[in-house]
Amino acid sequence: MKKILITNDDGYDAEGLKALISAVRGLGHITVVAPSTQKSACGHSLTLSKPLRFISVDDDFFKVDEGTPSDCVYLSLYALFDEKSRPDLVISGINEGSNMGEDITYSGTASAAMEAVLQGVPAISFSQVCQNGCGGKVIDFDLAKEVARDLVKKVLDGEFPLGERKFLNVNIPPVSKQKSKGYKITKAGHRLYGNDAQVNRNPRGVEYFWLGTHKLEWVGSDDKSCDLEAINEGFVSITPIQLDMTSHDDIENLKRWIAN
């Protein structure tokens, strides 16, 4: 039987995680390892300054006390699997909110997939885009569940479509299954960012800041091929992500620059 490791960054009790488990049930043996608390936007961080422990939630379901998504994958591959019985696929999500453009670098959801492919295990990250931000609203994961099951089954029944150190970043539009326009293969877009840090004072008069979120705004591409544009048009966006961040086009220019 195929083996699936599931994690997320919204915490072990998140509705998106429950939806993902439900979506892929029956496709293989499922092990779930997720953070004990909300870890959105933690990036590809590992916990090096304190010990971590698995806490059993249910059969083959654990939370990692104060761990990050990357911790969950890293520790799972070391403690719950071995070289002869590694998972066939790691899936991360379903994130409550988008992970497109440069958000991928912030994303704990995407970073769990990064950690998996660094360890040689194929991975897919799933995110449900919300209309005007999620903000505590009830999210309809019906389309996301259908997409997750379809793509996971396609991988487990065949092969992973990417090479080493590459993963699939999937974003689902905030539309019903009936209104979805299907899949679109995309590139990561160019997001526009603002600054939404809000300043307040606690009852003792001590100043503190609270970071907000940004609207989904972006720089358009000539061929409408980026993830943000695909979502805006009602497509499910599938973006191949590679971990090599070298700007290869600049290497020769940089050699000339340093020689002068």
Image (cartoon, grey):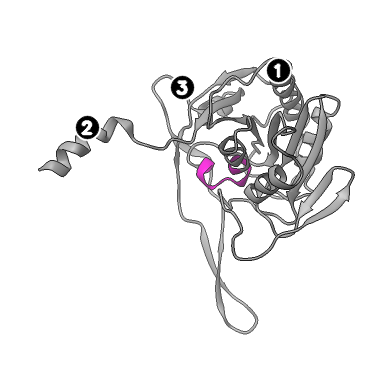
Per the image, the residue denoted by label 1 is 154
At x 69% / y 28%, what residue is drawn? Answer: 175
Residue type of the residue flagged with mark 1: Lys
Judged by depth in the image, the label closer to the viewer, 1 or 3, is 1
Residue sitting nearer the eye, 68 or 3: 3
- Tell me which corner region of the image, top left, top right, bottom left or bottom right, holds residue 231: top right
In the rendered image, residue 51, in percent from the top left (x then y), is placed at: 68, 63
Neighbour class for label 1 at 10 Å: few (<14), some, many (≥20)?
Answer: few
Q: Which mark is residue 252?
A: 2
Of the 4 image quadrants, the one containing the N terminus is top right
Judged by depth in the image, the label closer to the viewer, 2 or 1, is 2
Question: Secondary structure of the magenta portion, mostly?
Answer: helix
How far apart marks 3 and 2 lie (CA) works out to: 30 Å
Residue type of the residue flagged with mark 2: Glu
**Magenta residues?**
103-111
Residue type of the residue flagged with mark 3: Lys
Per the image, the residue denoted by label 3 is 224
